[in-house]
Image (cartoon, grey):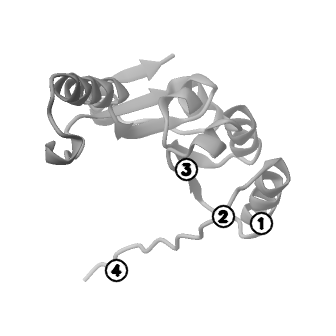
Amino acid sequence: MAKTPQATIEPLGVDDRPSLEAAFGAARAGKPDALMTTADPLLASYRIEVVALANERHLIAMFGDREYVRAGGLMFYGTSTIDMWRHAATHVDRVLKGAKPGDLPAEQPTQFELMINLKAARALGLTIPESILLRADNVLE
């Protein structure tokens, strides 16, 4: 029976620029195979630096926001912001028409997007399978 590969997840907290550099220093010392960020507003404010550090260290990286990919990062997979804003507008409309906010249903995202930066993939020496590229919502050359 084949053994299933396992991943070790090591959270690296970032509160400001010095802690961002410290987190990447700790990550480098641990020789990670990959990097994954969440959709965090503070981290997003450092997206250019995060992408540069990930690319410098040749880390395969999946980001929590499509703007990282536009900034040169490898890939994004997450909720469709456009769809989320559309749902938010519907809720605002209901409230403005008299609905009580507490009576509105809580909703989970239903639309997700995959965005891949082929230039970043080539720089990392990666070949993205055609089957993945066909599933991507956006492929940057």
- Give the mark toward the camera: 4 or 3: 3
Which of pointers 3 and 1 lies earlier in the amino acid sequence?
1
For the residues labelled 2 and 3, the Cα–Cα distance comes to: 10 Å
Whether tag 2 and tag 1 are in contact, CB under 8 A, the answer is: yes
Which of pointers 1 and 4 lies earlier in the amino acid sequence?
4
Q: Residues within 10 Å of mark 2 (few under 14, many from 20)?
A: few
Marker disc for residue 45: none
Q: Is residue 81 left or right of residue 67?
A: left
Which of pointers 2 and 4 lies earlier in the amino acid sequence?
4
Q: Nearer the viewer, residue 67 or 5?
A: 67
For the residues labelled 1 and 4, the Cα–Cα distance comes to: 29 Å
Taking the spot 60% from the left edge, 38% from the top edge, the residue there is: 125
- Tell me the amino acid under the disc marked 3: Thr
For the residues labelled 4 and 3, the Cα–Cα distance comes to: 27 Å
- Give the mark toward the camera: 2 or 4: 2
- Tell me the amino acid under the disc marked 1: Ala
- Percent across and percent down for residue 19 are 80, 57
Marker disc for residue 12: 2
- Give the mark toward the camera: 2 or 1: 2
Which of pointers 2 and 3 lies earlier in the amino acid sequence?
2
- In the picture of the structure, the residue carrying the numbered disc 3 is 37
Q: Secondary structure at mark 4?
A: loop
Q: Is residue 56 left or right of residue 59?
A: right
Q: Nearer the viewer, residue 119 or 41?
A: 41
- In the picture of the structure, the residue carrying the numbered disc 1 is 26
Q: Is residue 138 left or right of residue 23?
A: left
Q: Secondary structure at mark 1?
A: helix
Which of pointers 2 and 1 lies earlier in the amino acid sequence?
2
Taking the spot 62% from the left edge, 38% from the top edge, the residue there is: 44
For the residues labelled 2 and 4, the Cα–Cα distance comes to: 28 Å
